[in-house]
Amino acid sequence: GQQVMQIPQYQHVQEGEDFTTYCNSSTTLSNIQWYKQRPGGHPVFLIQLVKSGEVKKQKRLTFQFGEAKKNSSLHITATQTTDVGTYFCAGADNYGQNFVFGPGTRLSVLP
Amino acid sequence: DAGVIQSPRHEVTEMGQEVTLRCKPISGHDYLFWYRQTMMRGLELLIYFNNNVPIDDSGMPEDRFSAKMPNASFSTLKIQPSEPRDSAVYFCASNPSGSNNEQFFGPGTRLTVL
C-alpha cells in the first residue's frame, strides 16, 4: 500500500535558524496536506498543495510540492519558539483513496 | 462553532473492560474520521464515514473495535474488550468534503488501559 515517509524524525535548532522537513510518498499523490501538532495538542491544518511544482508561502513558512507529485517540503525561515511541534504531511493517491499521514518531524527550538 | 467535540478527554480503564469514545463533528460536515495516535505507529486512520455511512474501515485493527454514526452529529468508537496495547490518543476529525481536503481535528481522548 501507499507509504509516506518524512525526514528527519527529529530536529533541534537554535532560535533564528532555518528548518526544513521533507516528505516522500511511494506513489503519486492527488494532493499533499501539511499539519502542525503542538505538544499535547491535536493536528491543525496548515496548507494544501494540489498542482505539480506548486509553491506556497505563509509568512515564514514555505511549502513545495514536487514535479512528480511524490514529494514535498516545508521550510521555516528564522525559527521561533512558537514553531515547536510536530509537522505532518498527509496525502491520498491519485484516486483520492488511501489517505495516510507521514510519521512527522518533531521540531525543537532552543531559545 | 465549537469545533469537533470529543469525550471523555481522558479515560483510564482495566484490561477487559469496554470503552466507548464519543465524537460530535462540526455541524454541516458530512465526513467524520477516527484516528489513533501512538509513538510507535504514528497517526493511523481507523475508519471514516460519509453521511453517517462507514466508507472505509480497513484501518480498524481487529474485531474488538467498532464504530457507529447513528446521526450526523454523533459518532462512537467502541473497544470491547480493551487491552493494554490499545492505549493511545484517539482523535476524531471532520470535514465537509472528504479526506482530500482540510480535516478539523478534535482535542482527542487519551486512553490508558491497565
Image: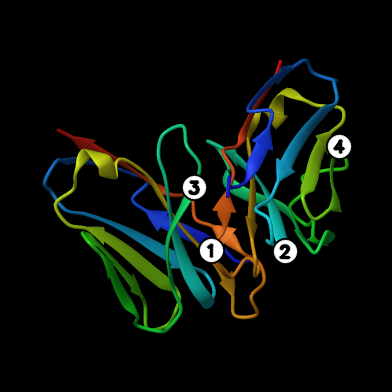
Q: Which badge, 4 or 1, comes first in the chain's sequence?
A: 4
Q: Where is residue B64 in the image (x, y as percent from the top left)?
A: 86, 37
Q: What amino acid is at disc 3?
A: Pro
Q: Residue furthest left?
A: A16
Provide the residue designation for mark 1. Answer: B102
Between the residue at mark 3 and the residue at mark 4, the CA separation in whole angstroms equals 26 Å
Q: What amino acid is at disc 4?
A: Arg
Residue found at x 22% / y 61%: A59
- Helix, strand or loop under label 2: loop
Quadrant of res B58: bottom right
Between the residue at mark 4 and the residue at mark 1, the CA separation in whole angstroms equals 30 Å
A24 left or right of B81? Answer: left
Q: Where is residue A30 in the image (x, y as percent from the top left)?
A: 54, 78
Q: Position of residue A100 (x, y in %)?
A: 58, 60
Q: Which mark is residue B64?
A: 4
Provide the residue designation for mark 3. Answer: A43
- Helix, strand or loop under label 3: loop
Chain name for mark 2: B
Between the residue at mark 2 and the residue at mark 4, the CA separation in whole angstroms equals 26 Å
Q: Decide which of B1, B109 is in the foreground and name it.
A: B1
- Helix, strand or loop under label 1: loop
Provide the residue designation for mark 2. Answer: B30
How many marks can you see?
Answer: 4
Dots 2, 4 in contact, CB < 8 A: no
Q: Decide which of A95, B78 is in the foreground and name it.
A: B78
Q: Are marks 2 and 4 on the same chain?
A: yes
Front disc: 1 or 2 = 2
Q: How crowded is mark 1: few (under 14 residues within 10 Å), some or many (20 or more)?
A: many
